[in-house]
Image (spheres, grey):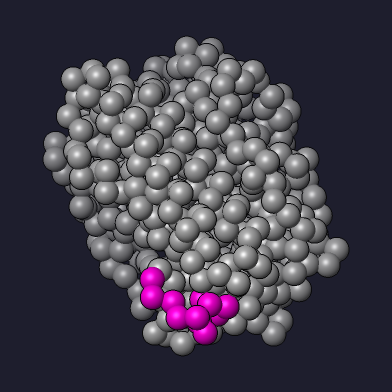
């Protein structure tokens, strides 16, 4: 099919502002200075005149409350309008971040510049947008929580020194919580620590596309502190994790599996849309996705169009859509989207890497049988905005082949030894509310199972989707506090290409017959494909 170039009926994409020189290849990146100002200096208020330059240089990104996560009860009739306004909020943040990145000189000369010229106007735009959401909800008789209006204000986030995990790679998967408060996989955490405020960023001027400082090829990450030599990481993988890095089913319950082979996006089906969170909005993701399986997924695809689409899956009964942010090598090269929204205009630069393997498998439940997924069920796992949102919804596993049963990283990219490949694994939520194919915040209709496999709140166990992506990535090098030729996932610009932002998306369009086969295989302990 090639790159997704389907019709666009209305565009909410970022325009010229996001094409600033600070984000474009060869445009100088983010020019930082003195990232080690004394701890008492504030990035919000109370700057003294002699702190101006240091404080201005410290501001790494803009952090805004995620309104969408708080909207858990939106009437169906209002959801399209609300989704459009939420996409407007993302667009506003993207534009504000681009302005932050392109005005470093002005910030260095004026301690109030960021607040007065960027954060203040952003608050006004967000307040108006949130009020339009209120009108959309109340127009159809819904209830709007007026406290959401307080989410209009954003803060700046400093480029503070990295809180080093000491080799443990940050938060363990078990420490994440779903929206219902259940802890995934027992709720254990390792001794790491979530990286904070952009890590150590020591510069950003580029020459010939190669970074000379530590701001990534696009000027907004990744940075040296985002990487770790996996051979120096203390083993932290959970017991019960199989050779493929994914949790085993256990010795009870539904022990079968169903594997579907859908390729690695060799036909380069990409777009920067997200039909789940921003239907009808072009460039709603502000970063590029790989698509395998369903070949009609873009912002404007209806369920009817998705159901009638072609698929790259060998089993033609699987027209499901599987999509995730692309992985890029920032080695000074450019790709087809260098001058596009969601690509180079928004800091997502470098060579797009095609996975060498994309393993898609559905497994059972430790406690008992699973039930069929409903057609058009949507599941998002992980959080594309985890760097600024916090890690409540983060669900990230990075490793290397040969290390998956020993080390799983969550807030670091691994540097793999020679002969070893980078691996991204994702385990999706496997409890469903039994009624809804989606929810207002795209999360509360599904949940993670407890450690024993049980589903809370009357939810039902469904087959758990597990995605394992393997990449041949030249190992980055760490030199004098900088990273040379890094790789990174595409992100919303303000999330600075942090590894914790990796995420994965799924829309179920298995035929009823194939879904029934899957459930039967899993519940009877068979391994099917």
> Residue at left 64%, top 46%?
18
Q: Which of 499/345 is in front? A: 345
Q: In this rendering, does residue 418 appear at all?
A: no
Q: Which residue occupies the extreme right position in the image?
A: 208
Q: Decide if residue 62 is on the left or right side of residue 298.
A: left
Percent coordinates x, y for residue 86 in the rendering: 41, 36
Residue 55, percent across and down?
A: 51, 76
Judged left or right of residue 37, residue 223 is right
Q: Residue at x 16, y 44 (%)?
A: 456
| Image vertical order of residue 199 relative to residue 480, above or below | above
Q: In which quarter of the image is residue 514?
A: top left
Q: In which quarter of the image is the N terminus?
A: top right
Q: Which residue lies furthest to the left in this view?
A: 457
Asked if 298 appears above or below 330 in the picture, the reply is above
Camera-side residue of 339 and 42: 42
Q: In this view, does 442 lie above or below 300?
A: below
Q: Name which quarter of the figure residue 507 lies in.
A: top left
- State yes or no: residue 86 in magenta: no
**Which is nearer the eye, 133 or 488?**
133
Q: Which secondary structure dominates the residues rendered in magenta?
A: helix
- Choose between 43 and 482: the one closer to the eye: 43
Tag count in the figure? 0
Q: Can residue 51 be found in the magenta stretch?
A: yes
Identify the residue at image location x=22%, y=24%: 138
Q: At which x and y percent is residue 510? A: 45, 23
Q: Where is residue 274 in the image (x, y as percent from the top left)?
A: 51, 33
Whether residue 118 is visible to the viewer of this picture, yes or no, is: yes
The magenta segment is 45-55
Left or right: residue 344 compared with residue 167: right
The correct choice, above or below, for 516 with respect to 210 in the image is above
Q: Which residue is at a point 19% across and 38% down the rendered structure image?
A: 145
């Amino acid at each position: 099919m090639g790159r997704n170039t389907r019709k666009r009926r209305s565009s909410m994409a970022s325009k010229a502002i996001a094409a600033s020189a600070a984000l474009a290849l060869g445009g100088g990146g983010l020019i930082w200075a003195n990232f080690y100002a004394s701890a008492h200096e504030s990035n919000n208020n109370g700057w003294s005149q002699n702190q101006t330059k240091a404080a201005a240089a410290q501001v790494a990104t803009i952090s805004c409350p995620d309104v969408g996560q708080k909207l858990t009860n939106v009437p169906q009739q209002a959801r399209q309008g609300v989704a459009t306004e939420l996409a407007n909020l993302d667009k506003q943040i993207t534009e504000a971040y681009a302005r932050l990145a392109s005005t470093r000189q002005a910030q260095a000369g004026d301690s109030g510049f960021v607040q007065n010229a960027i954060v203040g106007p952003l608050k006004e735009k967000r307040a108006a947008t949130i009020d339009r959401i209120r009108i959309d909800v109340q127009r159809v008789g819904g209830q709007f929580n007026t406290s959401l209006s307080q989410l209009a204000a954003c803060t700046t986030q400093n480029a503070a020194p990295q809180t080093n995990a000491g080799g443990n790679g940050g938060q363990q998967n078990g420490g994440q919580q779903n929206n219902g408060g259940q802890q995934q996989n027992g709720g254990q955490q390792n001794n790491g620590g979530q990286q904070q405020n952009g890590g150590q960023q020591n510069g950003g001027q580029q020459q010939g596309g190669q970074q000379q400082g530590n701001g990534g090829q696009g000027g907004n990450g990744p940075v040296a502190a985002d990487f770790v030599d996996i051979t120096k990481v203390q083993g932290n993988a959970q017991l019960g994790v199989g050779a493929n890095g994914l949790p085993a089913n256990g010795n009870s319950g539904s022990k079968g599996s169903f594997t579907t082979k859908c390729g690695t996006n060799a036909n380069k089906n990409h777009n920067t849309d997200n039909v789940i969170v921003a239907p009808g909005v072009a460039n709603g993701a502000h970063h590029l996705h790989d698509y395998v399986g369903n070949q009609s997924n873009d912002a404007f695809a209806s369920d009817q169009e998705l159901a009638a689409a072609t698929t790259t899956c060998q089993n033609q009964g699987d027209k499901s859509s599987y999509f995730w942010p692309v992985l890029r090598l920032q080695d000074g090269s450019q790709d087809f989207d260098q001058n596009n929204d969601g690509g180079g205009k928004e800091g997502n630069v470098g060579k797009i890497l095609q996975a060498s393997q994309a393993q898609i498998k559905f497994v059972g439940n430790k406690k008992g049988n699973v039930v069929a997924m409903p057609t058009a069920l949507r599941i998002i796992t992980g959080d594309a905005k985890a760097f600024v949102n916090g890690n409540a919804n983060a669900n990230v596993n990075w490793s290397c082949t040969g290390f998956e049963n020993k080390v799983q990283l969550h807030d670091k990219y691994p540097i793999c030894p020679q002969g070893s490949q980078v691996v991204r694994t994702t385990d999706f939520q496997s409890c469903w509310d039994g009624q809804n194919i989606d929810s207002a915040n795209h999360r509360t209709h599904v949940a993670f199972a407890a450690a024993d496999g049980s589903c809370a709140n009357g939810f039902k166990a469904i087959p758990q989707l597990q995605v394992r992506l393997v990449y041949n990535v030249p190992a980055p090098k760490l030199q004098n506090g900088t990273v040379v030729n890094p790789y990174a996932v595409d992100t919303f610009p303000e999330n600075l290409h942090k590894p914790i932002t990796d995420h994965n998306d799924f829309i179920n369009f298995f035929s009823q017959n194939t879904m029934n086969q899957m459930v039967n295989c899993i519940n009877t302990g068979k391994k099917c494909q």
